[in-house]
Image (cartoon, rainbow, N blue to C red):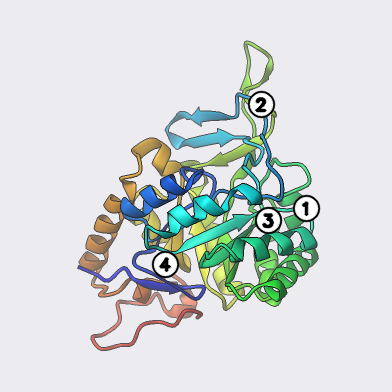
Amino acid sequence: MADLGVECAGMRLGNPFLLASGIWGESGESLAGAVRAGAGGVITKSIGAEPRAGYPNPTIETYSEWGLLNAMGLPNPGIDEYPKEVAIALRAGAPVIGSVFAGDAAGFAELARRMAALGVAGLELNLSCPHAEGFGTEVGSEPRDVEEIVRTVVRSTRLPVIAKITPNTTDPAALARAAERGGAAAVSAINTLRALAINVRLRRPVLAHGLGGLSGRAIKPVGLACVWQIYEAVSIPVIGVGGIATAEDALEYVMAGARAVEVGTAIAFDGIAVFERLSRELSGLLDELGYARLEEAVGAAHPSKGNAAPASAGRGAISGAR
């Protein structure tokens, strides 16, 4: 079977499937459960400086079989309450990446320092939540702001920093370049797409907050396009996010340029066992296509790579950055 191990952002992953922030990772035990189910690594829910209740219900709506519409409002227990959860997750043995959110560069840096002290392997900066006022897209939609936030965080910690980029912009590659200039070790793309559903009988939005974020199968083409553009624009690794439910979905992202992928909404539909299935099926698919290692397929669909065929026997693994 093909080797799924991959180097990404200074971390060695046994397979490329990361638990995405914001689903299933609300506690240390659920994070550890994702590792036991086969995730190559896990990303915590986004943690802020203070406890946050989030928006009132309804906060989530199933959008047919195509995904989920949600406006949670970044609910979290706050960084003071999170050490015990990280400690439980770390005992599972796979890399734990701490996700943080804040309203400015100084806030991100302080949270990064505190999260780093908990023993996580890396940090993901939530610069892309589409519906939380004062956070996410509101602080991560301009390249100069992304560069400032990332640079400030990088100066505050020795851990690899991953910038999570919004798709709700005219130029995601510009945001990725800004993150790279700021010293990011990797970019993850994408977060949810700003979206809305209306109950015509009640004549009001389905979600209490109104606007929400769309995730799942419906956004995969958008995520792929962003990863494709970002791979062409930067030299740091890219992590693909959005609509990954099958091995072919994952390999599309890899061939578009991703070195790892995050899985979220598929868990809501298929359960946590999706990680084991995805790994098994991806290894088989790579075998079928003649790849001995996943890393050989990274960026393989790009003209700049000559639509790369599987590497010949004995070729060394591709490095962490292109």
* For residue 109, side relative to residue 317 (left or right): right
Q: State the CA–CA distance, disc 4 to disc 1.
A: 34 Å
Q: Amino acid at mark 1?
A: Gly
The percent coordinates of residue 126 (x first, y second) are: 64, 55
**Residue at (42% x, 50% y) in the render:** 244
Residue receiving disc 3 = 127
- Nearest to viewer (mark 1 / mark 3): 1
Name the disc covering residue 255, or none. 4
Question: Quick one: label 2 or label 1, which is nearer the N terminus?
Answer: 2
Among the 4 quarters of the image, the one containing residue 95: bottom left
The answer to whether residue 142 shows anywhere in this view is: no
Q: Nearer the viewer, residue 39 or 307?
A: 39
* For residue 7, side relative to residue 210 (left or right): left
Residue receiving disc 2 = 56
Question: Quick one: label 1 or label 3, which is nearer the N terminus?
Answer: 1
Secondary structure state at the residue bearing disc 3: loop
Question: Quick one: label 4 or label 1, which is nearer the N terminus?
Answer: 1
Q: Residue furthest top?
A: 201
Q: Nearer the viewer, residue 58 or 219?
A: 58
Name the disc covering residue 103, or none. 1
The percent coordinates of residue 210 (x first, y second) are: 69, 28
The crowd level at tag 3 (other Cα within 10 Å; few <14, some 14-19, many 20+) is many
* For residue 169, side relative to residue 252 (left or right): right
Q: State the CA–CA distance, disc 2 to disc 1.
A: 21 Å
Q: State the CA–CA distance, disc 1 to disc 3.
A: 9 Å
* For residue 139, side relative to residue 236 (left or right): right
**Residue at (49% x, 45% y) in the render:** 27
